[in-house]
Image (spheres, rainbow, N blue to C red):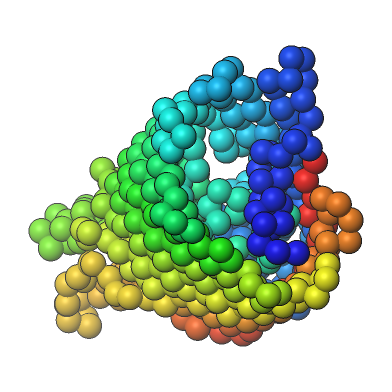
Amino acid sequence: MKKQLLAAAILAATGMMAQAGTLGDGNLSISGFGTLGVAQTDKDDAKFARYNQASGTGDSPRIGLDSNLGLQASYTFNDRLSATVQVLTRKNTSPQFTTDLTWGFLKYKLNDEINVRVGRVVLPAFLISDYQNVGYANTMMRPPIEMYGQAPIENLDGGDVNWQHAFGDTNVTVQAFGGISRGKLYIPTGGGSIAKHQSPVFGAAVTAEYGPFTARVAHARAQIESNNLGPINNVTDGLTKTGIPAMVQLANDLTLKGGKRMSFTEIGFTMDYKNVVLQAEYAQRRAHEPVYIPETNSGYAMIGYRMGKVLPYYTHAYYKGAGSTVTVPTVPAAHPLAPTLGAIRGLLTSPEQETDLVGLRWDFAKSLALKVQVDHVQPKVKGGSLILPSGVPTYSKSVNVYAVGVDYVF
C-alpha cells in the first residue's frame, strides 16, 4: 500500500470519502470511525492511561483505554460553503464513557488555495492532530503519551485560515489559527482531580509534502488559565495566608489563576517509501512567565516495514524535564515552612518517562484493521505519566502494556 492509499485511509477516517452515507439531496454526508480495543498491564499498583484519561488500565483486561466511537456529519450548501460536526465517545476525564463535540465549524472556500473555518476546530499542535483519535488512520494503537501528553488541549473555539500551494512537486500548506480552548484537564497530583480551563490560544503550522515525504513545523502560544486547580490552590492559599512577601510572591508564581503564558513548538516528519514507514516528532514546552508547570522536551521515532497487508513496527518515545520558571526561597532547615518549600521543589520537578513498543497492523478487510501492541513503559523521574495511588509520590518499576484492537471506518 503506497502513500496514496495511506492518505485515502486518513480521508476515509475523517469522513471525507464517498463511502460516507448521503441523505436527502446528496448534500448531507454522514460517516464514522471507531476502535474496539482491550488492554491490560502486568502491574496493578500503578495505572497506565492515555493523556488526560482519569481512569487507567491495570492488570485486568479493560476496554476503556483505546475504545472510542466517532460520528461526523457534513453538509455542503454550495461550492464554497459547507458545515461539519463531529462528536466523539470515549473515556477521557471521566471514569465513564462520555460524548463530546470535537468539531463544529463552517468552512468557506475563498478560492482554490485559501479556505476559512469558523467554530470549533482542531488545535493543530501535533503531526497527527487532525486524526489522532482515528485509530484506522494511524499505524500505532495510540499516540505516544510522552509526546501528546505535553499539550493535551485538542480543540479551540475560534477558527483557522488554510493556504495551500504547489511549488513544483512540493505541496505546501500554511495554517494560522486562534481562539479560546475550553475544557477539563485531569490532574494526577494528590490522587487525581479534575480542573476546568479556559485558555486563549493562537499559532501557526506549516506542512510540506513531496512524494512519499512529509515535513511539518508548528508553534502554539496559550494563556493557560484554571481557577479550580485543587492541589495547587491548596498550596498557594496556604502560602498567601502567611503574609510573608516572599511566600505571597511564590504563590503568585505557582498559580494558574489569571492565566500564564506558555508555548509549544513541534517538528514532525513522515515517510512511506518502498514499504518502509517512518514517523517522528520532537517538541518543546516552554513557560514565558513563572508557573508550576515544568518545561519539557519530548519526542518519538517509529519505523515499520509493510509486507502486503501486514505492517510490523517499533517505536521509542520519551520526555524529559527542561527546567522550571519558579524560584523557591531558601530557608533554614528548622524554619516552619521548610517542609512546605521542600514539597514545592518536588512539585516543580518534571516527571520523566521512556517507552519502547512493538506492534503489528493487519488490514484484513476493507475499512478494517487489526492491531496488536506491547508497550514497555519505564518511568525515570517520579512516576512518569503513570497514575499512582494517593500518597505515592514516585514509582520506578517498569510496566508492560498489552493491547489488541480493531479499527474501523464507515
Q: Residue at x 63, y 34 (%)?
A: 86
Q: Residue at x 39, y 73 (%)?
A: 297
Q: Residue at x 40, y 42 (%)?
A: 163
Q: Quadrant of the C terminus?
A: top right
Tell me where residue 133 appears, x and y as whole percent: 64, 51
- 39 or 219: which is nearer to us? 219
Answer yes or no: is residue 206 visible: yes
Image position of 6 (left or right of 350): right
The mark total stands at 0
- 11 or 194: which is nearer to us? 11
Image position of 125 (left or right of 305): left
Residue extending farthest right = 365
Task: Establish if 325 lies above or below 134.
Answer: below
Residue extending farthest front = 168
Q: Quadrant of the N terminus?
A: bottom right
Residue extending farthest top = 25
Q: Residue at x 12, y 63 (%)?
A: 246
Tell me where residue 307 appears, x and y as whole percent: 80, 75
Answer yes or no: is residue 395 visible: no
Tell me where residue 109 appears, x and y as whole percent: 47, 28
Image position of 118 (left or right of 4): left
Tell me where residue 408 appears, x and y as whole percent: 80, 50
Q: Which of the 4 image quarters holds residue 89?
A: top right
Residue extending farthest left = 245
Task: Establish if 62 lies above or below 237.
Answer: below
Q: Which of the 4 image quarters holds residue 192?
A: bottom right
- 140 or 38: which is nearer to us? 140
- 142 or 381: which is nearer to us? 142
